[in-house]
Image: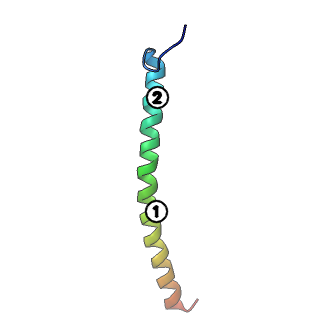
Amino acid sequence: MSHIMFTDPGIALLNVFLIVGAVLALVLAQALKANNKKLHQRNADQRKRIGY
């Protein structure tokens, strides 16, 4: 007997968690990337100021 993805509620719930988790990870990665660029620029500016 073969199962289709959404016939078993447990499998369906697991798939929903995996999909939502993957989308959330992509969104957070973009947000962290933008924040990291700002911190990198601040760090570079501070190094120039102290002559490092």
Any mark on residue 33, and which? Answer: 1
Secondary structure at badge 2 equals helix
Tell me which amino acid carries mark 2: Asn
**Crowdedness near tag 1: few (<14), some (14–19) or many (≥20) residues, C-alpha within 10 Å:** few
Tell me which amino acid carries mark 1: Lys
Q: Nearer the viewer, residue 28 or 1?
A: 1
- The location of residue 44, given as percent across then percent down, is 50, 81
Give the labeled residue for mark 2: 15
Q: Name the quarter where the C terminus is drawn.
A: bottom right
- The location of residue 26, given as percent across then percent down, is 45, 49
Dot 2 or dot 1: first in sequence order is: 2
Q: Residue at x 46, y 28 (%)?
A: 15
- The location of residue 21, given as percent across then percent down, is 45, 39
Confirm or deny contact between disc 2 and disc 1 (CB under 8 A). Answer: no
Query: Compared with residue 49, is residue 1 higher up or lower down, i.e. above or below?
Result: above
Q: Residue at x 47, y 42 (%)?
A: 22
Query: Compared with residue 4, is residue 29 higher up or lower down, i.e. above or below?
Result: below
Q: Residue furthest right?
A: 52
